[in-house]
Image (spheres, rainbow, N blue to C red):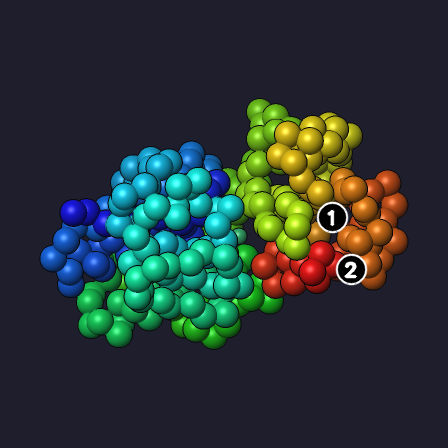
Amino acid sequence: MSVYVFGHKNPDSDSIVGAIAISYLKNQIEDEEYIPARQGDISAETEFILNRFGGKLPELKTSVAGERVYLVDSTDKPHFQDDIDEATILGIIDHHKLGDIMTSTPLECWIRPIGCSNSIVKEVYDAMGIAIPKDIAGMMMLAILSDTVIFKSPTCTNVDTKAVKELAKIAEIEDYKALAQEMFIVKSGTDGATARDLNTRDYKVFNMGDVRVGINQLEMIDISALDRRKDEIYSDMLMMKEEENLHTMIVLLTDIMKEGSQLLCVSDDIKKIEAAFNKKFENNQVWLDGVLSRKKQVVPFVQPQFD
Ligand code: MG
Ligand code: MG
Ligand code: MG
Protein backbone atom coordinates (compact mmCIF):
# COMPACT_ATOMS: atom_id res chain seq x y z
CA MET A 1 0.00 0.00 0.00
CA SER A 2 1.33 3.43 -0.96
CA VAL A 3 2.11 6.22 1.46
CA TYR A 4 1.07 9.77 0.61
CA VAL A 5 3.36 12.61 1.68
CA PHE A 6 1.92 16.10 1.90
CA GLY A 7 2.07 19.43 3.70
CA HIS A 8 -0.58 21.89 4.81
CA LYS A 9 -3.65 23.19 2.98
CA ASN A 10 -2.97 26.17 0.79
CA PRO A 11 0.42 24.64 0.11
CA ASP A 12 3.55 26.77 0.10
CA SER A 13 6.90 25.85 -1.41
CA ASP A 14 8.10 24.12 1.79
CA SER A 15 5.01 21.86 1.73
CA ILE A 16 5.27 20.94 -1.96
CA VAL A 17 9.06 20.54 -2.13
CA GLY A 18 9.03 18.72 1.22
CA ALA A 19 6.54 16.18 -0.18
CA ILE A 20 8.76 15.62 -3.23
CA ALA A 21 12.03 15.41 -1.26
CA ILE A 22 10.70 13.14 1.49
CA SER A 23 9.07 10.80 -1.05
CA TYR A 24 12.34 10.42 -2.99
CA LEU A 25 14.28 9.76 0.23
CA LYS A 26 11.77 7.19 1.49
CA ASN A 27 11.72 5.43 -1.89
CA GLN A 28 15.48 4.85 -1.51
CA ILE A 29 15.18 3.18 1.88
CA GLU A 30 11.67 1.70 2.28
CA ASP A 31 9.88 -1.09 0.44
CA GLU A 32 6.51 0.58 0.00
CA GLU A 33 5.99 3.39 -2.49
CA TYR A 34 5.89 7.00 -1.22
CA ILE A 35 3.90 9.42 -3.38
CA PRO A 36 4.21 13.23 -3.16
CA ALA A 37 0.81 14.88 -2.78
CA ARG A 38 -0.74 18.29 -2.15
CA GLN A 39 -4.01 19.63 -0.77
CA GLY A 40 -4.60 22.47 -3.20
CA ASP A 41 -3.32 24.68 -6.00
CA ILE A 42 0.31 25.71 -5.93
CA SER A 43 1.44 29.34 -5.75
CA ALA A 44 3.26 31.27 -8.49
CA GLU A 45 6.39 30.96 -6.33
CA THR A 46 6.16 27.17 -6.17
CA GLU A 47 5.48 27.00 -9.90
CA PHE A 48 8.68 29.01 -10.42
CA ILE A 49 10.62 26.49 -8.32
CA LEU A 50 9.18 23.41 -10.08
CA ASN A 51 9.81 24.94 -13.52
CA ARG A 52 13.36 26.01 -12.67
CA PHE A 53 14.38 22.51 -11.58
CA GLY A 54 12.03 20.30 -13.59
CA GLY A 55 9.97 19.19 -10.59
CA LYS A 56 6.70 17.32 -11.12
CA LEU A 57 3.46 18.69 -9.66
CA PRO A 58 2.42 16.40 -6.77
CA GLU A 59 -0.96 14.73 -7.03
CA LEU A 60 -4.02 16.40 -5.49
CA LYS A 61 -5.24 14.57 -2.39
CA THR A 62 -8.20 16.11 -0.58
CA SER A 63 -9.39 13.00 1.27
CA VAL A 64 -7.19 10.50 3.14
CA ALA A 65 -9.56 8.22 5.10
CA GLY A 66 -8.00 4.74 5.32
CA GLU A 67 -4.70 5.90 3.77
CA ARG A 68 -1.17 5.78 5.18
CA VAL A 69 0.33 9.26 5.24
CA TYR A 70 3.48 11.23 6.11
CA LEU A 71 3.09 14.91 7.05
CA VAL A 72 5.38 17.83 6.44
CA ASP A 73 5.35 21.49 7.55
CA SER A 74 2.47 21.39 10.08
CA THR A 75 0.89 19.37 12.87
CA ASP A 76 -2.24 21.56 13.20
CA LYS A 77 -5.46 19.69 12.42
CA PRO A 78 -7.22 22.59 10.64
CA HIS A 79 -4.34 22.52 8.12
CA PHE A 80 -5.14 18.99 6.95
CA GLN A 81 -7.92 17.09 5.20
CA ASP A 82 -11.18 16.95 7.14
CA ASP A 83 -10.79 13.15 7.43
CA ILE A 84 -7.14 13.20 8.59
CA ASP A 85 -8.23 11.42 11.81
CA GLU A 86 -9.09 8.36 9.72
CA ALA A 87 -5.59 8.13 8.19
CA THR A 88 -2.57 6.38 9.71
CA ILE A 89 0.24 8.89 10.22
CA LEU A 90 3.62 7.20 9.71
CA GLY A 91 5.76 10.26 10.25
CA ILE A 92 6.10 14.02 10.55
CA ILE A 93 8.80 16.49 9.56
CA ASP A 94 8.00 20.01 10.77
CA HIS A 95 9.34 23.29 12.15
CA HIS A 96 6.20 24.81 13.74
CA LYS A 97 4.70 24.71 17.21
CA LEU A 98 3.33 21.29 18.04
CA GLY A 99 -0.29 21.25 16.93
CA ASP A 100 -3.28 19.09 17.77
CA ILE A 101 -2.70 16.14 15.43
CA MET A 102 -2.86 12.84 17.39
CA THR A 103 -1.80 9.35 16.36
CA SER A 104 -2.90 5.93 17.55
CA THR A 105 0.29 4.17 16.42
CA PRO A 106 4.00 4.93 16.95
CA LEU A 107 5.45 7.29 14.40
CA GLU A 108 8.72 8.79 13.29
CA CYS A 109 8.90 12.47 14.14
CA TRP A 110 11.48 15.08 13.22
CA ILE A 111 10.49 18.47 14.63
CA ARG A 112 13.02 21.24 15.13
CA PRO A 113 12.70 24.99 15.78
CA ILE A 114 14.58 26.04 12.65
CA GLY A 115 13.78 28.04 9.53
CA CYS A 116 12.35 25.45 7.17
CA SER A 117 11.09 21.86 7.05
CA ASN A 118 13.38 21.24 4.10
CA SER A 119 16.43 22.00 6.26
CA ILE A 120 15.30 19.12 8.48
CA VAL A 121 14.70 16.95 5.40
CA LYS A 122 18.31 17.69 4.40
CA GLU A 123 19.49 16.50 7.83
CA VAL A 124 17.48 13.29 7.46
CA TYR A 125 19.06 12.61 4.04
CA ASP A 126 22.48 13.10 5.65
CA ALA A 127 21.60 10.91 8.64
CA MET A 128 20.44 8.12 6.32
CA GLY A 129 23.46 8.51 4.02
CA ILE A 130 21.32 9.13 0.92
CA ALA A 131 22.62 11.40 -1.86
CA ILE A 132 20.25 14.24 -2.84
CA PRO A 133 19.63 14.41 -6.61
CA LYS A 134 20.63 17.70 -8.26
CA ASP A 135 17.07 18.79 -9.15
CA ILE A 136 15.67 18.02 -5.70
CA ALA A 137 18.62 19.83 -4.08
CA GLY A 138 17.79 22.95 -6.12
CA MET A 139 14.15 22.86 -5.09
CA MET A 140 15.00 22.30 -1.41
CA MET A 141 17.46 25.19 -1.54
CA LEU A 142 14.78 27.58 -2.85
CA ALA A 143 12.18 26.31 -0.35
CA ILE A 144 14.60 27.16 2.49
CA LEU A 145 15.41 30.57 0.98
CA SER A 146 11.64 31.22 0.74
CA ASP A 147 10.77 30.18 4.30
CA THR A 148 13.74 32.06 5.78
CA VAL A 149 13.16 35.13 3.55
CA ILE A 150 16.71 34.80 2.23
CA PHE A 151 18.06 34.30 5.80
CA LYS A 152 16.39 37.50 7.13
CA SER A 153 13.65 35.78 9.13
CA PRO A 154 14.23 35.46 12.89
CA THR A 155 13.40 31.77 12.43
CA CYS A 156 16.57 31.28 10.38
CA THR A 157 19.37 29.32 12.06
CA ASN A 158 22.85 28.26 11.01
CA VAL A 159 21.37 24.84 10.19
CA ASP A 160 19.37 26.57 7.44
CA THR A 161 22.22 28.66 6.04
CA LYS A 162 24.52 25.62 6.03
CA ALA A 163 21.84 23.52 4.29
CA VAL A 164 21.37 26.17 1.58
CA LYS A 165 25.11 26.36 0.92
CA GLU A 166 25.45 22.59 0.64
CA LEU A 167 22.32 22.24 -1.52
CA ALA A 168 23.49 25.07 -3.82
CA LYS A 169 26.71 23.15 -4.37
CA ILE A 170 24.81 19.95 -5.27
CA ALA A 171 22.43 21.90 -7.54
CA GLU A 172 25.40 23.74 -9.07
CA ILE A 173 23.86 27.16 -8.42
CA GLU A 174 26.56 29.74 -7.79
CA ASP A 175 24.53 32.88 -7.02
CA TYR A 176 21.68 31.41 -4.99
CA LYS A 177 20.74 34.79 -3.53
CA ALA A 178 20.15 36.22 -7.01
CA LEU A 179 17.94 33.25 -7.87
CA ALA A 180 16.04 33.73 -4.60
CA GLN A 181 15.58 37.42 -5.39
CA GLU A 182 14.06 36.39 -8.74
CA MET A 183 11.76 34.00 -6.86
CA PHE A 184 10.59 36.77 -4.48
CA ILE A 185 9.78 39.04 -7.44
CA VAL A 186 7.48 36.28 -8.73
CA LYS A 187 6.04 35.84 -5.24
CA SER A 188 5.36 39.60 -4.93
CA GLY A 189 3.19 39.74 -8.06
CA THR A 190 -0.36 40.97 -7.44
CA ASP A 191 -1.49 41.90 -10.96
CA GLY A 192 -4.78 40.24 -11.81
CA ALA A 193 -5.22 38.93 -8.25
CA THR A 194 -8.63 39.53 -6.65
CA ALA A 195 -8.90 40.63 -3.03
CA ARG A 196 -9.85 37.03 -2.20
CA ASP A 197 -6.77 35.71 -4.05
CA LEU A 198 -4.64 38.05 -1.93
CA ASN A 199 -6.44 37.18 1.33
CA THR A 200 -5.98 33.45 0.80
CA ARG A 201 -2.45 33.48 -0.63
CA ASP A 202 -0.82 32.10 2.52
CA TYR A 203 -3.89 31.73 4.71
CA LYS A 204 -3.96 29.50 7.80
CA VAL A 205 -6.60 28.90 10.46
CA PHE A 206 -5.57 28.29 14.07
CA ASN A 207 -7.72 26.91 16.86
CA MET A 208 -7.08 29.26 19.78
CA GLY A 209 -8.99 28.48 22.97
CA ASP A 210 -12.60 28.09 21.82
CA VAL A 211 -12.28 30.23 18.73
CA ARG A 212 -10.88 30.15 15.22
CA VAL A 213 -8.32 32.75 14.18
CA GLY A 214 -7.40 33.14 10.51
CA ILE A 215 -4.00 34.60 9.62
CA ASN A 216 -2.92 35.33 6.07
CA GLN A 217 0.53 36.55 5.09
CA LEU A 218 1.69 38.24 1.91
CA GLU A 219 5.46 38.45 1.61
CA MET A 220 6.38 41.17 -0.83
CA ILE A 221 9.42 43.12 -1.99
CA ASP A 222 7.36 46.35 -1.70
CA ILE A 223 3.98 46.36 0.05
CA SER A 224 3.19 49.90 -1.15
CA ALA A 225 2.04 48.16 -4.34
CA LEU A 226 -1.12 47.30 -2.35
CA ASP A 227 -1.74 50.78 -0.87
CA ARG A 228 -4.60 51.49 -3.26
CA ARG A 229 -6.26 48.13 -2.52
CA LYS A 230 -6.43 48.27 1.30
CA ASP A 231 -10.21 49.04 1.38
CA GLU A 232 -10.93 46.17 -0.99
CA ILE A 233 -8.76 43.81 1.07
CA TYR A 234 -10.45 44.96 4.27
CA SER A 235 -14.00 44.44 2.90
CA ASP A 236 -13.07 40.94 1.79
CA MET A 237 -11.57 40.21 5.24
CA LEU A 238 -14.97 41.07 6.77
CA MET A 239 -16.61 38.60 4.40
CA MET A 240 -14.06 35.88 5.07
CA LYS A 241 -14.49 36.35 8.81
CA GLU A 242 -18.22 35.54 8.42
CA GLU A 243 -17.80 32.72 5.90
CA GLU A 244 -15.05 31.00 7.85
CA ASN A 245 -16.64 31.52 11.24
CA LEU A 246 -13.59 33.33 12.60
CA HIS A 247 -13.27 35.33 15.80
CA THR A 248 -10.43 37.28 14.22
CA MET A 249 -8.95 37.58 10.77
CA ILE A 250 -5.47 39.02 10.40
CA VAL A 251 -3.63 39.88 7.21
CA LEU A 252 0.10 40.49 7.42
CA LEU A 253 1.52 42.55 4.59
CA THR A 254 5.16 41.70 5.06
CA ASP A 255 7.71 43.97 3.42
CA ILE A 256 10.87 41.94 3.07
CA MET A 257 13.00 44.95 2.17
CA LYS A 258 11.75 47.22 4.98
CA GLU A 259 11.80 44.13 7.24
CA GLY A 260 8.46 44.55 8.94
CA SER A 261 4.75 43.89 8.52
CA GLN A 262 1.62 45.98 8.24
CA LEU A 263 -0.98 44.07 10.25
CA LEU A 264 -4.62 44.41 9.16
CA CYS A 265 -7.25 43.03 11.49
CA VAL A 266 -10.98 42.42 11.79
CA SER A 267 -12.03 40.95 15.11
CA ASP A 268 -14.89 40.42 17.53
CA ASP A 269 -12.53 41.88 20.13
CA ILE A 270 -9.75 43.94 18.59
CA LYS A 271 -8.50 44.85 22.09
CA LYS A 272 -7.18 41.30 22.40
CA ILE A 273 -5.06 41.75 19.28
CA GLU A 274 -3.90 45.20 20.39
CA ALA A 275 -2.90 43.65 23.72
CA ALA A 276 -1.05 40.84 21.93
CA PHE A 277 1.30 43.36 20.33
CA ASN A 278 0.99 46.07 23.00
CA LYS A 279 0.07 48.58 20.28
CA LYS A 280 -2.90 50.81 19.53
CA PHE A 281 -4.35 50.14 16.07
CA GLU A 282 -5.42 52.92 13.74
CA ASN A 283 -8.09 52.09 11.15
CA ASN A 284 -7.76 48.46 12.25
CA GLN A 285 -4.10 48.33 11.30
CA VAL A 286 -0.62 48.79 12.70
CA TRP A 287 2.98 48.64 11.45
CA LEU A 288 5.07 46.02 13.26
CA ASP A 289 8.73 46.78 12.78
CA GLY A 290 10.96 43.73 12.43
CA VAL A 291 8.04 41.29 12.20
CA LEU A 292 8.63 38.83 9.36
CA SER A 293 7.54 35.49 10.82
CA ARG A 294 3.95 34.46 11.51
CA LYS A 295 5.00 31.34 13.45
CA LYS A 296 7.54 33.08 15.67
CA GLN A 297 6.41 36.69 15.96
CA VAL A 298 2.63 36.59 15.54
CA VAL A 299 1.00 33.28 16.57
CA PRO A 300 2.85 33.04 19.95
CA PHE A 301 1.58 36.51 20.94
CA VAL A 302 -2.01 36.15 19.71
CA GLN A 303 -2.55 32.62 21.08
CA PRO A 304 -2.21 33.51 24.83
CA GLN A 305 -5.00 36.08 24.45
CA PHE A 306 -7.40 33.18 23.94
CA ASP A 307 -6.05 30.62 26.43
MG1 MG B 1 4.48 26.28 5.27
MG1 MG C 1 7.80 25.77 6.39
MG1 MG D 1 6.02 30.92 5.14
**Image point 48% across, 46% down: which residue?**
79
Q: Relative to residue 106, is residue 142 drawn left or right?
A: right
- Of the numbered discs 1 and 2, the one sitting upstream in the chain is 1
Which residue is situated farthest in the front direction here? 104
Q: Position of residue 210 (x, y in %)?
A: 66, 50
Q: From the Cβ of disc 2, is ligand 3 less than 8 Å away? A: no
Image vertical order of residue 12 relative to residue 226, above or below: below
Q: Position of residue 24 (x, y in %)?
A: 22, 54
**Image point 69% across, 60% down: which residue?**
307
Residue located beneath label 1 in the image: 263
Distance, label 1 to label 2, CA atoms, is 10 Å
Image vertical order of residue 167 relative to residue 193, above or below: below
Amino acid type, label 2 = Phe
Residue located beneath label 2 in the image: 277
Secondary element under disc 1, as helix, strand or loop, is strand
Q: Position of residue 281 (x, y in %)?
A: 85, 49
Mark 1 nearby-residue class (10 Å; few <14, some 14–19, many ≥20): many
Secondary element under disc 2, as helix, strand or loop, is helix
Q: Name the mark nearer the viewer: 1 or 2.
A: 2
Tag count? 2
Q: Nearer the viewer, residue 157 or 41?
A: 41
